[in-house]
Image (cartoon, grey):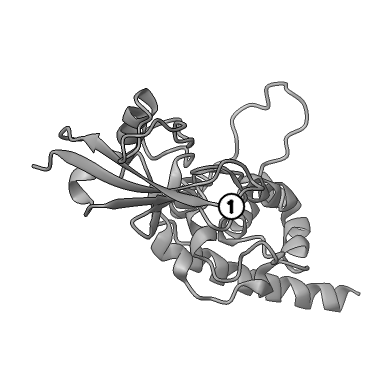
Amino acid sequence: MPEFIHLKIKRQNNPNEAPYWEEFKVPYKPNMNVVSVLMEIRKNPVNAQGKKTAPVTWDCSCLEEVCGACTMIINGNVRQACSALIDKLPQPITLQPLSKFPVVRDLKVDRNVLFEHLKKVKAWVNIDGTFDLGPGPRVPEKERRWMYEISRCMTCGCCYEACPNFNAKSSFIGPAPLAQVLRFNHHPTGAMDKEERLNLIMGDGGITDCGNAQNCIEACPKRIPLTTAIAKLNRETIVHSIRRWFAS
């Protein structure tokens, strides 16, 4: 067993300052994850040279790989800090913020663009009023199963980080919102807005901006069938465009 856990953390004091690396050595304890090590640094913010420093900033919430808040790049791979076990990571452990989102500070990034893209494609079911609508429509089991798979998305940003077509200069809405379009277009109530969603993803930054690199499905911690969803959407947008052409 190692005496210390050796970390190299890419830090940044604010969005306008240059990033820098700082090393830490934290006393080893069994069964630690990356979040627990960062909490130890927060309790005693002293770097590997023994100098007092500012506590490392990062995001976390559920600690169960459900919320996606603690997503970062760990040893070169994008993943969640809560499920990254120290005993399974080679040292020194390098921690970096996601590179496709603006850095707020240290390992904390602003994922707002992801949520804006979800709003753009209307990734919800429109229900007017707050009154009781009674039981919802029944969904065939086969449909329910794959819709549930897509619903497991935790908006962590892993697919964005892995996607070569998404960056600060790109208008591509990303794999996760596209998958949600398919999910809500096949929901019995959400289907009311199907044509509007399809029109939205047929425009700038939509489905044609996907280069089919298929990195997203490899990076997704929930193994959501993103490439299958995008392939289905490709077919649906083609059918929709032909129908629209004949109707014009």
Residue situated furthest right in the rendering: 248
Q: On screen, 177 above or below 210?
A: above
Q: Which residue is mark 1?
A: 18
* The image quarter in which residue 208 lies: bottom right
The residue located at (54%, 57%) in the rendering is: 99
Q: How many marks?
A: 1
Indicate the quadrant where residue 26 lies. top left
The foreground one among 3 and 239 is 3
Q: Residues within 10 Å of mark 1 (few under 14, many from 20)?
A: few
Q: Amino acid at mark 1?
A: Ala
Whether residue 63 sits left or right of residue 97 in the image: it is left
> In the displayed structure, would residue 119 be above or below residue 195?
above
Query: Going by the image, does 81 lie left or right of 233?
Result: left
Residue 95 x, y percent position in the rendering:
39, 49
Q: Nearer the viewer, residue 2 or 46?
A: 46
Q: Secondary structure at mark 1?
A: loop
Residue 245 showing in the rendered view? yes
Residue 180 x, y percent position in the rendering: 59, 53
- 161 vs 124: above or below: below
Q: Among all residues in the image, which is located at the extreme top?
A: 131
**Residue 176 point in image, percent of width and height:** 56, 56
Front in this rendered view, residue 191 or 56: 56
Left or right: 201 in relation to 80: right
Say which residue appears at 72% left-offset and 64% top-offset.
171
